Amino acid sequence: MSQQRHPGRIGENAVVIGASMAGLCAARVLADRFDHVTVLDRDSLPDSPTWRNRVPQGRHPHLLLAAGARLIEDWFPGIIDELYAGGAVEIDLTADMHWHQGGGLARRPPSSLRGPSMSRPYLELTVRRRLTSMPNVSIRGDTDVQGVTLDDTGRVVAVQLDDHSLPCELVVDATGRQAHTLSWLEQLGYPQPAISRVEVNTRYVTQELARHEHPERDWKAAGVIDEPAAKRLAMALPVEGDRWLVVFGGVHGEAAPGDAGERLAYARTLPSPVIAQLLEESDPLTEPVTHRFPASQRRHVERLKRFPLGWVLLGDAIGSFNPIYGQGMTAAAQQAAALAEALDRQGQIDARFARRYFKAASRVVNLAWSTAVGSDFVYAETTGPKPPGTDLINRYMNRVTVAAQHDDAVSLRFTEVVAMVRKPESLLTPAFILRVLRSQRPSGTTHVTKPV
């Protein structure tokens, strides 16, 4: 059988459980390395960009950050232009973004941090269509996975469906925060990974609005972060169908009103008027929807000592972060890239492959975790394991956000970290720290200097 396998492929059958972006990215990299890849999801998977009832967060804004957009384009050449052709809006994360934080507006230099803004259902539909066009990939909705079958050596040999088993050599659990395979494996005697949780108690209220051109509007997307004591923020992202997705977020009990008139009054109290102006100018298309996010969570898969061979977690199953930072889809794509590299480096599905992947996936989560969880600790009510040095870093990051209001290069570097194309450590080099300290200026002044 191995002699008939396509060159570069290391297995016959791989199964991905979950057709989220995490599962779809995993399926794409596995398609180059397995003869057959099957994606299974318990939901119906519509042939239109409509919301899925079992994915309540799908109704809220999602960002595909620059790092994620680059990976998606590499895996599916031309897909970014395809998204634009279908109505996604191209955004430069610095030049096109009205970002108000730390008492002022960040500078907006042009950048290469460009990517599409669209709804999550539209992105997933486009990727699903690309995947199903691949001859060795199949995607099945309305399919409940009941368990995982192991042989006597502890190796995955199949997943159990309602009426039959589906043979496989590798199963990727991309079922989200619940990570359904863990309960099955626990019944077979395998330990669960240790979990870290940081409680932030976030509530989001999102509404779709009609999007029209406005001659005085010089931005395509907006974010307004209030002072920590206010515990609130708001964001507006353009999506396909000439729509806005406008979201209000509150932490630790803060919540935007459900009534439209009260919500407008609430928006007018934000430190920037742009969200209130958008509400005044735009007609609502839907009723507001609410989503609660109790805690950022990560599973320390890198610490596992015992696990089945041919089983891995990916996406929110490993790390799930406060959604307002927009890191989830990009982190999932980066974990899929790490999965591909681990398979290529090891060349077979064994314990060394799994440990290599778990360590690499943990590094991806570390980057997102340090940004999201560190930022969540600006609120005194946040509880959970606080990364060492968080308070000092947050005080420094306050200086960075102010410096970004006066210095193009600081604004650009900060956005590169947010877009996950640079590591957070790039904000801590001696040259950059000195630049931040020199860039503090009285409100209303600007300071444009050469790039770092």
Image (cartoon, rainbow, N blue to C red):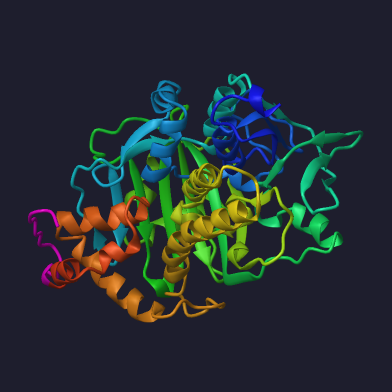
Magenta stretch in the rendered image:
438-452
Please give left or right for residue 300 compared with residue 272 in the image: right
**Which residue is depicted at the point 41% across and 32% down?**
74
**Which residue is depicted at the point 79% across and 54% down?**
154
Q: Is residue 96 visible?
A: yes
Residue furthest to the front in view is 3
Magenta span main SS? loop
Number of marks: 0
**Considering only vertical position in the picture, is 180 above or below 48?**
below
Q: Nearer the viewer, residue 81 or 33?
A: 33
Is 309 part of what is drawn in magenta? no
Q: Is residue 99 visible?
A: no
Please give left or right for residue 391 compared with residue 329 in the image: left
**Considering only vertical position in the picture, is 60 above or below 75?**
below
Residue 401 picture quarter: bottom left
Residue 300 screen position, x and y as percent: 60, 66
